[in-house]
Image (tube, rainbow, N blue to C red):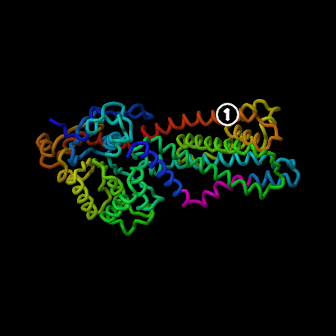
């Protein structure tokens, strides 16, 4: 069997393996993915706007942010935790790393599965959003923008997988519990979910800081497509921003992955 | 004359950076494994055996030296070398969320095996290792001995030319040690080269043609059991091992603990 064919076969076998393992834990997955957006939507998208503490159009601001957040967090979690566990605790990955293909194949599989999980994360948010904030969300997206939206969502999923692989090569399993307060919380709350980048103009330092968060670029891009009535960063700029994040995080993550594979 | 070495290791080195500085885990060792032989690789805990195995099985990058399979440098085509080798690690690296059958199935797919062949080989190996009745059970429910047998079955599935076994019989009861040795000898007769580390000297004495003994990252001795006995003026491999590795036994144990 030639090398390319073998690599393809091994790639899909590894994807199949990861999905089978994930499927066996499907309810844990749904709970993990749905819980954070559910609580945030319930409080910020339903309760507070309904009683008047937040403006009535707040759910529209928040909806795009919830999609971005859910996709990013799901992809990060779905890639980072298995990578960290596999290398440091279970060492189950060794059989795949001994397959007669480049070790990078294993990293690409992890990222591919992270991308799929990220999409599922986005899909899970939709019904929750529609049930709790449906009538309050104003989407003004032209049908011609659907391909652009799909592209933005693909880039979002890729960014989540790249960041997930990077995080997975940095944290140890004993640090996973600290990942939420130490990493995911800042990413979520500084990621322009509840506000836009322009709304932060009275706080220029914070405007600069939140640009370090990839979620800001993602949410601004999704808003630019789905809710053009809200002032966002230019779509082309946000897409370039996401691509830069993917490339930078991807390169660093793959280098760190190689180092973990060959310099244990 | 043709060189019959399936594996040649030349001046292999590995260093680790630790908090206390650089540790030389493997200090320029050289040896050969001949095609079709059973090769015994011995050393006290922490001698550098597993580090060496990890390097020759493409799992760890050396800091120096050469690893040559069939005359080809390992770095030329790592994937091709992986097709030739089967590896049984010391620790349990099975997929615990999969069944025994699935572990073998996916392993076969990673090696590009045909599904029908995977099924046939799996059935044969699972039956041989007494795991057929438990093939649909998740590996996380397996005892240590069962997991060990499954690891060996998995490494054998793609019919490697050289099988690396890092302390394969540790944790196996005498029955399954015999079964394993029957299998290994059968595979060896069929042409599979076996590279073995073990703490059971009688296994090496009975089955290995050549033996290498390591201590603190250095190769202390290499040769047949007879040659090593003559060299150390002893009458058993156990005595050879003790004579070579126990010259400053206290230090040995200390270095082993430090590495662990």
- Regarding residue A178, the answer to whether it shows in the image is no
Does A190 appear above or below B128? above
Number of marks in picture: 1
Q: Measuring 55% from the left and 56% from the top, which residue is drawn there?
A: A22
* Residue A55 falls left or right of residue A77: right
Q: Measuring 25% from the left and 45% from the top, which residue is drawn there?
A: B42
Q: Regarding mark 1 in the picture, which secondary structure is present there? A: helix
Q: Measuring 81% from the left and 46% from the top, which residue is drawn there?
A: A140
* Residue B246 falls left or right of residue B82: left
In this view, the residue farthest toward the bottom is B133
Q: Main secondary structure of the magenta part?
A: helix
Location of the N terminus of chain B (image quadrant)? top left
Q: Measuring 52% from the left and 41% from the top, which residue is drawn there?
A: A169
Is residue A165 a member of the stretch shown in magenta?
no
In the rendering, at what x and y percent does residue A196 appear?
Answer: 78, 39
- Regarding residue B53, the answer to whether it shows in the image is yes
Is residue A33 a member of the stretch shown in magenta?
yes
In the rendering, at what x and y percent does residue B68 appear?
Answer: 28, 36
Location of the C terminus of chain B (image quadrant)? top left
Mark 1 neighbour density, 10 Å: few (under 14) some (14–19) many (20 or more): some
Does B177 appear above or below B166? below
Provide the residue span drawn in magenta. Answer: A22-39
In the rendering, at what x and y percent does residue B108 appear?
Answer: 39, 54
Q: Chain of mark 1?
A: A
* Residue A30 falls left or right of residue B87: right
In the rendering, at what x and y percent does residue A167 appear?
Answer: 57, 41
Looking at the picture, tell me which residue is in the foreground, B107 or B115. Answer: B115
Residue at numbered disc 1: A241
Does B164 appear above or below B247? below
């Amino acid at each position: 069997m030639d090398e390319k064919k073998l690599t393809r076969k091994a790639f899909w076998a590894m994807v199949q393996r990861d999905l089978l393992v994930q499927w066996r834990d499907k309810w844990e997955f749904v709970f993990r993915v749905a819980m954070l957006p559910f609580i945030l939507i319930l409080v910020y998208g339903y309760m507070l706007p309904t009683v008047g503490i937040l403006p009535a159009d707040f759910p529209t601001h928040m909806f795009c942010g919830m999609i971005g957040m859910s996709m990013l967090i799901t992809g990060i979690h779905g890639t980072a935790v298995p990578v960290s566990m596999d290398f440091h605790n279970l060492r189950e990955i060794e059989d795949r790393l001994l397959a007669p293909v480049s070790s990078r194949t294993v990293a690409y599989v992890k990222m591919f599965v992270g991308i799929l999980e990220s999409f599922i994360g986005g899909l899970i948010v939709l019904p929750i959003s529609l049930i709790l904030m449906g009538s309050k969300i104003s989407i003004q997206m032209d049908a011609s923008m659907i391909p652009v939206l799909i592209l933005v969502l693909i880039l979002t999923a890729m960014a989540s997988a790249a960041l997930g692989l990077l995080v997975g090569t940095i944290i140890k399993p004993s640090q996973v519990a600290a990942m939420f307060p130490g990493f995911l919380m800042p990413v979520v709350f500084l990621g322009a979910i509840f506000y836009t980048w322009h709304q932060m103009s009275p706080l220029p330092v914070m405007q600069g800081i939140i640009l370090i968060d990839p979620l800001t670029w993602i949410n601004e891009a999704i808003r630019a497509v789905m809710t053009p009535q809200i002032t966002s960063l230019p779509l082309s700029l946000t897409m370039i921003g996401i691509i830069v994040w993917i490339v930078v995080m991807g390169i660093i993550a793959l280098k760190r992955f190689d180092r973990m594979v060959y310099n244990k | 004359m043709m060189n019959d070495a399936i594996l040649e290791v030349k001046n292999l080195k590995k260093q680790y950076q630790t908090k206390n500085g650089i540790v030389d885990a493997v200090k320029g060792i050289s040896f050969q494994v001949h095609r079709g032989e059973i090769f015994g690789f011995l050393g006290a805990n922490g001698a550098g055996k597993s580090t060496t195995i990890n390097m020759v099985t493409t799992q760890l990058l050396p800091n120096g030296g050469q690893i040559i399979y069939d005359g080809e440098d390992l770095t030329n085509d790592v994937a091709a070398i992986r097709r030739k080798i089967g590896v049984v690690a010391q620790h349990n690296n099975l997929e615990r969320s999969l069944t025994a059958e699935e572990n073998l199935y996916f392993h076969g797919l990673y090696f590009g095996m045909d599904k029908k062949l995977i099924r046939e080989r799996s059935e044969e190996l699972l039956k041989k290792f007494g795991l057929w009745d438990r093939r649909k059970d998740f590996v996380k429910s397996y005892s240590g001995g069962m997991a060990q047998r499954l690891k060996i079955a998995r490494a054998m599935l793609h019919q490697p030319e050289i099988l690396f076994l890092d302390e394969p019989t540790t944790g196996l009861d005498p029955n399954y040690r015999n079964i394993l040795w029957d299998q290994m000898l059968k595979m060896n007769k069929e042409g599979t080269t076996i590279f073995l580390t073990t703490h059971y000297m009688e296994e090496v004495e009975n089955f290995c043609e050549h033996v290498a003994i390591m201590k603190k990252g250095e190769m202390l001795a290499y040769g047949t059991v007879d040659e090593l006995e003559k060299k150390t003026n002893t009458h058993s491999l156990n005595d050879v091992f003790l004579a070579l590795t126990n010259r400053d036994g206290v230090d040995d144990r200390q270095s082993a603990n430090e590495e662990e």
